[in-house]
Image (cartoon, grey):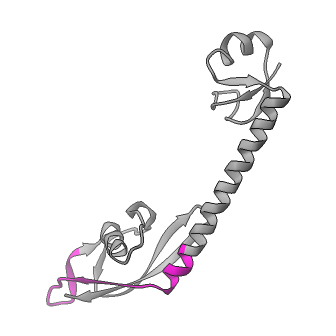
Amino acid sequence: MEVILNEDVQKLGKAGTIVKVKDGFARNFLIPNGLAVPANSANLRRLQQEQQRKQSQIENLKKEAEELKDKLTQLSLTIASLTQEDENLYGGITAQDISAALKEESFDIDKSQIILSKPIKSLGIYEVPVKLHPEITVNLKVWVVKK
């Protein structure tokens, strides 16, 4: 019997895939537990519509990320920080600080999207990568200046 999986089933397949299983396994376990539905024409149509909807949603997210990338490439972010006499910062500029500065500039970027291997510890101009989408990363120019 062929069924369409509603959820990921270990050792069987991922949600949205069509798999062939024994009749008893489908009737007694998969279908009653809501893990799968029979692969008939109505359910196949519904699966196809769902895949098209997901695909268009992914394309919209990618388009929004591209637009945000264009805006961020033009942005030059300035962060003022207290320094010691030798031009080193007292603390450090972290991803959270950059995220807060972006929020002040009306960009909603989460700190987890900012790829900063270690905090910035001195004054200068830095290129900080920001991952907007799994396929889209932009280098943000961050100026660290004396307060």
> Residue sitting at 45 percent across and 64 percent down?
113
Name, please, the residue furthest toward the right: 41
Q: Position of residue 28 (x, y in %)?
A: 69, 9
Q: Position of residue 1 (x, y in %)?
A: 83, 18
Is 90 colored magenta in this rendering?
A: yes
Q: Position of residue 90 (x, y in %)?
A: 17, 77
Asked if 6 appears above or below 118 in the picture, the reply is: above
98 relative to 91 in the view: left or right: right
> Number of marks in the image?
0
75 relative to 48 in the view: left or right: left
38 relative to 111 in the view: left or right: right
Q: Position of residue 15 (x, y in %)?
A: 67, 35
Asked if 71 appears above or below 135 in the picture, the reply is: below
Nearer to the camera, 114 or 105: 105
> Residue sitting at 17 percent across and 83 percent down?
82
Magenta segment boundaries in residue numbering:
68-91
The C terminus - image quarter: bottom left
Asked if 20 appears above or below 106 in the picture, the reply is: above
Nearer to the camera, 97 or 125: 97
Is 145 colored magenta in this rendering?
A: no
> Residue sitting at 38 percent across and 63 percent down?
111
> Residue sitting at 58 percent across and 68 percent down?
64
